């Protein structure tokens, strides 16, 4: 199998894994269609709101594990590239990106998924844990100051892109494309939150 076929296989397998939308599956186990209740979002927050903490814990574990599993498949396929003095596993990047795309637009559930933040965070951690932890610090800081989770998420995603260009991290252009894709998907999925932020109607986190 050539390297390009391995990368495409990583992307496809990551997508199929990501399409296993945990919140929809858990909702069905509880006898409810999560997309028809609460905010109608197929994600962790709405699961917590509609089904409670035990169900939300299952969703959290499932969303993280499928991102990790996809990345392990990408690593196993082992397609590496050198670019600009850096070296990255492009099959890992493809599998990780695929899992987030699958979560957001799952083939098994009419392409209607969640916002993908948990899966994206797991994938980003697997690919570059130092950059992810730094971005997590930005996420926490923004929420501490503003109490807007959505704003913290968007800022962390953009910061992840920004630091991907720092020479200290030794990233290739492929990693930078991956980081940009993650940010675009996260921002796109938070369109309604951005509108509410602009209107001053976005819900704040209560400590």
Image (tube, rainbow, N blue to C red):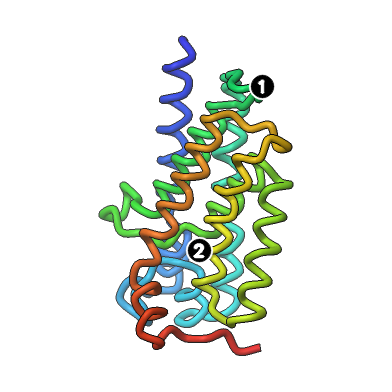
In the rendered structure, which disc, 1 or 2, sits on the residue that comes first in sequence?
A: 1
Q: Nearer the viewer, residue 35 or 98?
A: 98
Measured as percent of width and height from the top left, residue 49 is found at 48, 82
How many other residues sit within 10 Å of disc 2, few (<14), some (14-19) or many (≥20)?
A: many
Q: Mark 2 points at which residue?
A: 154
- Identified at 73% across, 37% down, the residue is 168
Up-down relation of residue 158 to residue 97 (above or below): below
The quadrant the C terminus occupies is bottom right
Measured as percent of width and height from the top left, residue 110 is found at 26, 54
- Identified at 65% across, 57% down, the residue is 135
Q: Is residue 65 visible?
A: no
User: In the image, is 199 to the left or to the right of 7?
Assistant: left
- Identified at 61% across, 51% down, the residue is 122
Up-down relation of residue 101 to residue 203 (above or below): above
Q: Which of 31 and 17 is in front in this view?
A: 17
**Circles 1 and 2: CB distance less than 8 Å?**
no
Which picture quadrant has residue 138? bottom right
- Identified at 68% across, 31% down, the residue is 170
As drawn, which residue projects farthest toward the left? 110
Q: Nearer the viewer, mark 1 or mark 2?
A: 1
Between the residue at mark 1 and the residue at mark 2, the CA separation in whole angstroms equals 29 Å
On residue 94, the disc is none
Q: Mark 1 points at which residue?
A: 85
How many other residues sit within 10 Å of disc 1, few (<14), some (14-19) or many (≥20)?
A: few
- Number of residue marks: 2
Up-down relation of residue 81 to residue 1 (above or below): below
Up-down relation of residue 148 to residue 100 (above or below): below
Q: Which of 98 and 34 is in front in this view?
A: 98
């Amino acid at each position: 199998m050539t390297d390009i076929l391995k990368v495409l296989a990583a992307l496809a397998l990551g997508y199929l894994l990501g399409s296993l939308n945990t919140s929809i599956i858990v909702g069905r186990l509880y006898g409810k269609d999560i997309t028809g209740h609460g905010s109608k979002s197929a994600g962790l927050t709405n699961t917590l709101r509609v089904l409670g903490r035990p169900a939300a814990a299952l969703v959290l574990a499932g969303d993280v594990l499928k991102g990790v599993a996809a990345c392990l498949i990408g690593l196993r396929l082992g397609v590496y590239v050198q670019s600009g003095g850096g070296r990255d596993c492009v099959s890992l990047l493809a599998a990780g990106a695929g899992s987030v795309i699958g979560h957001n637009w799952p083939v098994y559930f009419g392409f209607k998924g969640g916002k993908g933040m948990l899966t994206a965070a797991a994938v980003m951690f697997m690919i570059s844990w130092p950059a992810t932890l730094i971005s997590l610090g930005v996420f926490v800081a923004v929420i501490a100051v503003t109490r807007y989770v959505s704003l913290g998420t968007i800022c962390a995603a953009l910061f992840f892109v920004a630091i991907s260009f720092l020479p200290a991290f030794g990233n290739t252009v492929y990693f930078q494309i991956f980081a940009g894709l993650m940010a675009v998907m996260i921002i796109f999925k938070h369109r309604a939150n951005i509108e509410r932020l602009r209107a001053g109607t976005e819900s704040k986190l209560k400590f």
